């Protein structure tokens, strides 16, 4: 039935290069609601490469994907599935896992959209690491094959076993094991050393390196700290007990990522038993998902921080125990621990066999997310045992990566012509 609606072969169709008549106007529309002074910083980060441009233009691909036919099977989408949005982080009990770790665009939607975006990212990141298109396409085939085969295995698991399934060091190898080791080194104490300085007292404070990290006015600081009361109510009773043992000491504004630049993002430094016991919270503004325009099931008026937090909890096997949400001046915010043992791969590391190796584990992680939140049996049956879907997704990924590269060239021309302003943060 699903294959009659959309064959696996037709999943590979991309109509061909589209001409974006005014890339500056398109990006300007996407950036509405963000802090105007930081848009040049976002544009500067996107100008680094086609892959960086891709990371900053999820709404552009969302519109393109929405124009394509789909099978009709819905899952909880990551929404911005790309190779930098998977990585290693600490589970609540401290052990390290590999999983999807960015959910700003999460929403229930067609499973194909996640797989296609992730596949395109493999090509773009692979090209950035100077791999040939042949190597990149082989990696996408590996990604899709692993996604397909993992779905088949997950569809046969008892529900409780699927709910507990993790990609951990014992079951991983090579590049993933390296990421887990990297995450193991990223402790709160290291974050303290990286983001703070001594102000002559025994308690450290955030250092100031505008615009990346800077202190906020007293009025803003008070609003942020006051919002922690509402955030506390989104935590379970046990987590509230732990949170209550920490006390806020300093607040700063922080620029993060590429696609998120321009949103209001704050970090709060808290201490428990003393200056050796830090906790960092990130209070991140969440705008509606870029897919909201195209998903009929989107809930009008929903809290965007709650949408992101609950989407993350549905997708991840082990989520941040301090994940919650709050509201400041009517704007919606996600609250989570900042960089708690979190590590992601640099595209420059994806050379040769490493690209395919990394693609395979990304395919497994995405399959787990979709199996947990959708009809795993129907998905596995549609994807099948042959390599038809592998070939189709590879065709789509290569063609759409060319589209992104074409869009990136227009973007760079607009920068050169002065239509788009860029700024490199200090």
Image: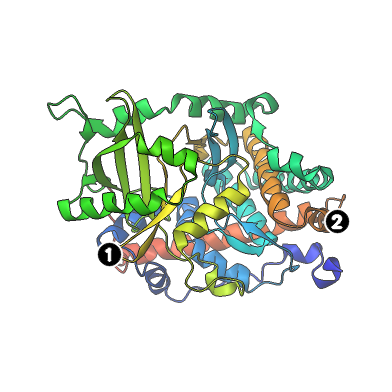
State the residue at coordinates (39%, 74%).
25
| Residue density around tag 2, few if under 14, some if 14–19, many if 20 or more, within 10 Å | some
Disc number at residue 376?
Answer: none
Residue 17 seen in render: no
Q: Residue lying furthest left in this view?
A: 200
User: From the viewer's perspective, is residue 105 above or below residue 129?
Assistant: below
Q: Position of residue 44 (x, y in %)?
A: 34, 54
- Quarter residue 268 falls in: top left
298 sits left or right of 338 in the view: right
Task: Please identify the quadrant where the C terminus is shown.
Answer: top left
Task: Please identify the quadrant where the N terminus is shown.
Answer: bottom right
User: From the viewer's perspective, is residue 379 above or below residue 252?
Assistant: below
Q: How many marks?
A: 2
Task: Give the residue number, with chain letter if any, for mark 2.
Answer: 381
State the residue at coordinates (74%, 69%).
72
The one of 394 and 114 positioned closer to us in this rendering: 114
Disc number at residue 36?
Answer: 1
Residue 206 seen in render: yes
Q: Position of residue 29 (x, y in %)?
A: 40, 73
- Quarter residue 316 falls in: top right
State the residue at coordinates (42%, 59%).
286
Scheme of image coloration: rainbow
329 sits left or right of 47 in the view: left
Q: CA distance from mark 1 to mark 2?
A: 47 Å
Q: Position of residue 293 (x, y in %)?
A: 54, 74
User: From the viewer's perspective, is residue 377 above or below residue 242?
Assistant: below
- For mark 2, give the secondary structure: helix
Q: Position of residue 176 (x, y in %)?
A: 61, 31
User: From the viewer's perspective, is residue 421 above or below residue 168?
Assistant: below
97 sits left or right of 60 in the view: right
Specify which label sits upstream in the sequence, 1 or 2: 1
State the residue at coordinates (40%, 48%).
232
């Amino acid at each position: 039935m699903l294959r009659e609606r959309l064959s696996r072969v037709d999943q590979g169709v991309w109509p061909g290069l589209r001409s974006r008549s005014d890339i500056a106007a398109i990006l300007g529309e996407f950036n509405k609601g963000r802090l105007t002074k930081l848009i040049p910083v976002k544009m500067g980060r996107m100008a680094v490469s086609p892959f960086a441009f891709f990371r900053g233009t999820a709404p552009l691909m969302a519109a393109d994907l929405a124009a394509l036919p789909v099978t009709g099977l819905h899952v909880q989408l990551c929404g911005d599935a790309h190779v930098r949005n998977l990585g290693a982080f600490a589970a609540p009990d401290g052990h390290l896992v590999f999983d999807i770790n960015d959910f700003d665009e999460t929403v229930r939607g067609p499973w194909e959209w996640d797989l296609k975006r992730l596949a395109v990212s493999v090509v773009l990141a692979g090209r950035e690491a100077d791999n040939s298109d042949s190597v990149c396409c082989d990696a996408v085939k590996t990604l899709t094959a692993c996604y397909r085969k993992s779905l088949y295995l997950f569809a046969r698991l008892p529900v409780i076993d699927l709910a507990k399934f993790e990609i951990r060091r014992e079951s991983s190898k090579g590049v993933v094991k390296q990421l887990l080791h990297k995450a193991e080194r990223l402790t709160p104490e290291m974050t303290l050393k990286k983001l703070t300085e001594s102000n002559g007292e025994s308690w450290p404070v955030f250092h100031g390196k505008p615009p990346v990290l800077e202190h906020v006015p007293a009025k803003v600081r008070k609003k942020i700290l006051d919002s922690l009361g509402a955030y506390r109510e989104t935590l379970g009773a046990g987590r509230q007990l732990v949170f209550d043992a920490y006390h806020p000491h300093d607040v700063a504004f922080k620029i993060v990522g590429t696609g998120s630049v321009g949103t209001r993002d704050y970090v709060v430094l808290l201490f428990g038993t003393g200056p050796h016991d830090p906790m960092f919270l990130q209070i991140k503004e969440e705008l509606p998902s870029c897919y909201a325009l195209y998903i009929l099931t989107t809930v009008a008026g929903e809290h965007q921080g709650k949408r992101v937090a609950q989407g993350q909890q549905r997708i991840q096997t082990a989520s941040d125990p301090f994940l919650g949400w709050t509201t400041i001046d009517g704007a919606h915010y996600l609250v989570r621990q900042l960089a708690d043992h979190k590590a992601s791969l640099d595209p420059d590391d994806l050379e040769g066999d490493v690209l395919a190796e990394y693609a395979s584990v990304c395919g497994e992680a995405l399959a787990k997310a979709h199996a947990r939140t959708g009809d795993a049996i129907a998905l596995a049956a549609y994807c099948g045992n042959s390599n038809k879907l592998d070939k189709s997704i590879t065709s789509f990924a290569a063609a759409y990566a060319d589209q992104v590269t074409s869009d990136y060239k227009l973007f760079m021309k607009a920068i050169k012509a002065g239509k788009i302003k860029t700024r490199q943060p200090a």
